[in-house]
């Protein structure tokens, strides 16, 4: 398999697909393209219908979009371990993953992932509402599943991959959460696989101006 991603410091969607493959110890070749370069657009134009990452190529199959890649990997290689086994929990996990996939636009725009930075941002009301909703998700799920593994549904899965970049955003911008939500966020940030991504991100030197939001702390 080949996974095409972008700068680890900035690319949240790349992280979501990458961490699923890594957490389940699947073998793949990583191709790191640099945002805002001619090579980025040229490479993707030859392999995918849209010039966005991530893109997964598995033999003759090409899959783009993080959630679609996660679903493909889950069905093809994980025997559905990526989602909870309980039908209700599985349905809720999919709903939460889809909510992240399509929502929280204000948070995305105001708080772009920037692992190397420590920043302060004057939050809009919509961003505060997005943060409150994520706090609710983290705290409710952690309270319910703390004793079964501590991830959003006990065992780590696709839904945790979808929310992993949020924990990194909250760390960068100093977002405070309630105790239960913080406990989940700290679990995410202590993940050894995520630490590998962070280490690589800290080595990068490229600057993507549109993702350099806020004031330095």
Image: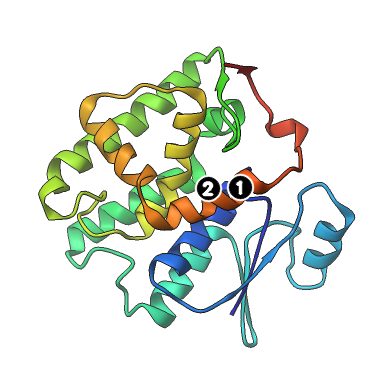
Where is residue 213? Give x, y as percent.
65, 24
Where is residue 21? Give x, y as percent.
47, 69
Depth order, front residue of 144/23: 23
* Residue that mark 2 sits on: 198
Image side of residue 182 versus residue 110, left or right: left
Depth order, front residue of 165/45: 165
Q: Is residue 138 above or below residue 148?
A: above
* Badge 1 density bin: few <14, some 14–19, many ≥20, Cα 10 Å: some
Q: Residue at x 74, y 59 (%)?
A: 33
Depth order, front residue of 203/160: 203
Badge 2 vs badge 1, beta-carbon distance below 8 Å: yes
Q: Would you identify the image quadrant in which residue 181 lies?
A: top left
* Badge 2 density bin: few <14, some 14–19, many ≥20, Cα 10 Å: some
Q: Is residue 199 above or below residue 212?
A: below
Q: Residue at x 55, y 12 (%)?
A: 122
Q: Is residue 168 above or below residue 159?
A: above
Mark 1 lies on a secondary structure that is: helix
Q: Which mark is residue 173?
A: none
The N terminus sits in image quarter: bottom right
Q: Residue at x 80, y 58 (%)?
A: 40
Q: Is residue 98 above or below residue 43?
A: above
Of all residues, the one furthest to the right in this rendering is: 38
Q: Residue at x 47, y 38 (%)?
A: 168
Of all residues, the one furthest to the bottom in this rendering is: 59
Where is residue 17? Give x, y as percent.
51, 61
Where is residue 8? Give x, y as percent.
62, 50
Q: Which mark is residue 201?
A: 1
């Amino acid at each position: 398999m080949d996974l095409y991603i972008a700068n680890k410091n900035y690319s949240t969607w790349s992280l979501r697909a990458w961490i699923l493959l890594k957490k389940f110890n699947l073998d793949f070749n990583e191709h790191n393209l640099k945002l805002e370069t001619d090579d980025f657009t040229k490479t993707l134009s030859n392999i995918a219908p849209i010039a966005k990452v991530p893109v997964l190529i598995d033999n003759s199959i090409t899959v783009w979009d993080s959630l679609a890649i996660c679903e493909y990997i889950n069905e093809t290689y994980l025997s559905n371990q990526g989602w909870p086994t309980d039908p209700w929990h599985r349905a809720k996990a999919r709903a939460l993953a889809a909510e992240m996939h399509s929502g929280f636009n204000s948070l995305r725009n105001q708080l772009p992932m920037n692992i190397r930075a420590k920043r302060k941002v004057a939050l809009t009301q919509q961003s505060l509402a997005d943060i409150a909703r994520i706090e609710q998700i983290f705290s409710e799920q952690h309270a319910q599943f703390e004793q079964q593994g501590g991830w959003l549904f006990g065992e780590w899965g696709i839904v945790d991959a979808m929310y992993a970049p949020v924990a990194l955003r909250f760390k960068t911008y100093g977002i405070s959460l309630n105790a239960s939500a913080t406990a989940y966020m700290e679990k995410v940030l202590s993940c050894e696989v995520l630490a590998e991504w962070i280490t690589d991100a800290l080595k990068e030197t490229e600057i993507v101006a549109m993702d350099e939001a806020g004031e330095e702390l």
